[in-house]
Structure formats: C-alpha cells, structure tokens
Amino acid sequence: MKLAMTYSYLKQDLDHIEKMLTKTIQAKHPVLREASKQLLQAGGKRLRPVFVLLSAKFGNYDMERMEKVAVSMELIHMASLVHDDVIDEAELRRGEPTVKARWDNRIAMYTGDYIFARSLEYLTTIDNPRAHQTLSETIIELCIGEVEQIRDKYVIEQNVRNYLRRIKRKTALLISSSCKIGAIAAGVPAGYEKALYRYGYNIGMSYQIIDDILDFTATEKELGKPAGSDLLQGNLTLPVLYAMEDPLLKSELEDLFSEPSELTTDGIQPILAKIKASDAISKANAVSERYLQKAYQSLDELPDTKAKQTMKDIAKYIGKRKS
C-alpha cells in the first residue's frame, strides 16, 4: 500500500496546504520565485504537514490554524533541503536538478534563506509563544546539525553516538516539532502533546536511518539520485559505521577518503558492495526497528482514534519502505 493511502481522508486538507505552499513562496524577484517554485514542484511526501494535521486531531481541529502550522513546517523542511544540496554539492534531488545545479550556490543559499523567512512570517498568526519558541529551538538545532555534517565530512573517526545526534538535528526534531506545534495550535492536552512529540521524534529517527540504508540498497531510479551518494559526499551513515567495525574495510575507506576530490561513483562501488555484503545493513535495520517500537509505545498513551491508527500505519510503512 502506498503511504498516501494511509491518510487519504486528509486529502482535501492536504490539497489546500499544497495550494497555500505555492502561494506563500511567490517572490517579487523572478529568480527567487522560479527557484522556490522549482523546489516545490519537485514534490515530496509532505510528511510534516501530515503529522501536523494528525496531531491536531487530538484537540480542536481548526483548519485555518492548522494550515499555518503545516505550511510553516514544510517550508522549513524545503529550506533545509536547499542548504543541504549546497553542502553536499548535490546535482539531483528526486530525479530533478537541484536549485544549486540549475543556478549556483549563492542563489541556492538565498533561496533557502527566503523560504526560511517566509516560514517564520507565516507562523506569526499563531498567538501562542510556545509554538514560536519550539520552532525557533528547532531551527537552531537544525543549523547546528548542518554545521556538524560539514565538519564531519570525510572524517573516519566517528561513532554511532555522533551519527544519532546528527540525524536527531537533521531530521527527527523537525518531525517531532511538527507533531508538537500542531498539538499546541489545537490545544491538545499536555499529556497527549508529550506523547505526540515522542512519537514524532522516534519516527523521525527511524525514517532517517531507513533513508541512509536505502542509499545502499535502493536503485538510482528509486532514490532519484545515484546510489551511494552519502558515501561519495563523505557522509558516514549508520551502515558505514557498522561496516567499519571490520578493520580492513575501515582502512580501505580511509584510503578512499584521503583524496576526496578524486572520489567517483565508479570508484566507490567496491566499498558499496562490501558494505551491502556485510551485516551492517541488518544491524542498522535493527536500530531503526527499535525506534519504531518506541514510536508505537508513545501511541499507547493516546486515545483510540482514526488519527492514532493512521500514525500506526505510517510507522508500519516507514519500517518497510523501499524508496
């Protein structure tokens, strides 16, 4: 079953949010407008708006308020992707040229900044300081995560703790904050709000780990970018960290990373094959599953509703996804 089928009853609200995203990114400057439009049209699962809406279902579901939160959270995600592509020197995202590939790094950075600013502006209509504080803290952590990713590029001496802290900032916090701010805007009881935040955090951690596994196991067509892109860009993900427990493989990778400018897609294929043949993938999958189980446990604290069942179905999908 496709992911969108699990929350198909939200389609009308999500279609409205999509229209508002298009309206919100309109800029007076033609280059900013075109660059933002390109990013939006590249698509995506729109998971953050989905989590905003689902979390709000446990309180006072007012679509006018929820739209503000959902659009704002998705814009922050979009902005982070633009910045990410500059850091990673990525040419493709979801099978389409990135903003930095079509224009240049400066245009991409300003586009990301513009979208960030629009997201903050859009949330100003929510008159709850906790929502704004949560969003600000999330953006701060997101930026720290990006800086850490730059710092750790091609650095062999990393550990699992570094990795988990990095993906917490890169992915999990924005998803957990989508749940939390959606709950805040809907006046969800404090106990439910905390459970929703924990669910979002654990789902986010699992989602990113699976993403990093797919970089080794999925095809270029499924990924929308070349397989092994993370490794090519010097990002050590969980499968790589586990594979490096083999001293020989670690030594080979160290040799490869000694000349980053000479790394090529063909050149990393032998290492990719060894990582796929090791037990690193299954070990990484086991970590992802542990986070999923924690997400399920968080849902146990919520009343039995359609939204809760949908959150279970999304967790199940994430655990099995292939792209």
Image (cartoon, rainbow, N blue to C red):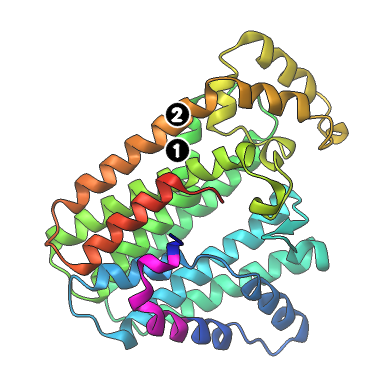
Q: Which mark is residue 130?
A: none
Please count the marks in the image. Answer: 2
Instruction: Please tell me whether the stretch drawn in magenta is mainly helix, strand or loop.
Output: helix
Residue at 54% in and 45% down:
211
Is there any visible trace of residue 104 in the rendered image?
A: no
Secondary structure under the numbered disc 2 in the rendered image: helix
Relative image position of residue 290 (x, y in whole percent): 33, 35
Give the alpha-carbon distance from disc 2 to disc 1, as whole Å. Answer: 6 Å
**What is the span of residues highlighted in magenta in the rendered image?**
4-17
Residue at 46% in and 83% down:
15
Instruction: Name the residue furthest right.
Output: 262
Q: What crowding class fits label 1: few (fewer than 14 Cα within 10 Å), some (14-19), or many (20 or more)?
A: some
Q: Viewed as shown, does residue 93 lie left or right of 64?
A: right
Q: What residue type is labelled 2?
A: Arg
Q: What crowding class fits label 2: few (fewer than 14 Cα within 10 Å), some (14-19), or many (20 or more)?
A: few
Is there any visible trace of residue 195 in the rendered image?
A: yes
Q: Do the residues labelled 2 and 1 touch (CB within 8 Å)?
A: yes
- Residue 183 or 138: which is nearer the viewer? 183
Inspect the magenta stretch and tell me whether residue 73 lies in it: no
Q: Which mark is residue 165?
A: 1
Residue at 65% in and 70% down:
42
Q: Is residue 147 above or below residue 48?
A: above
Inspect the magenta stretch and tell me whether residue 8 lies in it: yes
Q: What residue type is labelled 1?
A: Arg
Q: Viewed as shown, does residue 103 lie left or right of 10?
A: right
Q: Viewed as shown, does residue 1 lie left or right of 242?
A: left
- Residue 76 or 92: which is nearer the viewer? 92
Residue on which the image places disc 2: 161
Residue at 41% in and 37% down:
288
Relative image position of residue 271 (x, y in whole percent): 72, 24
